[in-house]
Amino acid sequence: MHNEVAGSQVPREIMDRMRDAKEIGTEKARQEGVAIAQEILGVIKDMLEGVQISPLLGKYELALEVLKAL
């Protein structure tokens, strides 16, 4: 999102976590991405009335994993 969505900024800590996970492998990167999304939802869930989750390449099982944080 940092480079693909105009005006969005991803914190350096998140970028570092994803870069480090990607170096280990694709599955680790997926797991880390889900973990990050779950952490964010856990923090902001009381401020939301809804959430849109768009899984990469139709990987709906990943979206379901993210939703477990709610």
Image (spheres, grey):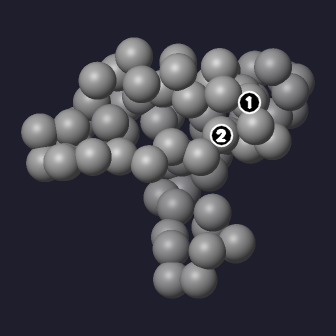
Between the C-alphas of marks 1 and 2, the distance is 5 Å
Q: Position of residue 48 (x, y in %)?
A: 19, 48
Residue 13 sits above or below residue 17 on the image: below
Q: Position of residue 55 (x, y in %)?
A: 65, 40
Name the element at disc 1.
Answer: loop
Residue at image position (86%, 27%) is 26
| Relative depth, front residue between 56 and 7 | 56
Name the amino acid, label 1: Lys
Residue at image position (18%, 48%) is 49
Residue 9 seen? yes
Residue 34 seen? no
- Are discs 1 and 2 less than 8 Å apart at CB? yes
Q: Which residue in the protein does label 1 denote?
A: 59
| Relative depth, front residue between 15 and 33 | 33
Residue 29 sits above or below residue 52 on the image: above
Q: Quadrant of the N terminus?
A: bottom right
Residue density around tag 1, few if under 14, some if 14–19, many if 20 or more, within 10 Å: few
| Relative depth, front residue between 53 and 26 | 53
How many numbered discs, if any?
A: 2
Question: Is residue 56 left or right of 13 when viewed as pictured?
Answer: right
Residue 70 sits above or below residue 47 on the image: above
Q: Which residue in the protein does label 2 denote?
A: 55
Name the amino acid, label 2: Pro
Name the element at disc 2.
Answer: loop
Residue density around tag 2, few if under 14, some if 14–19, many if 20 or more, within 10 Å: some
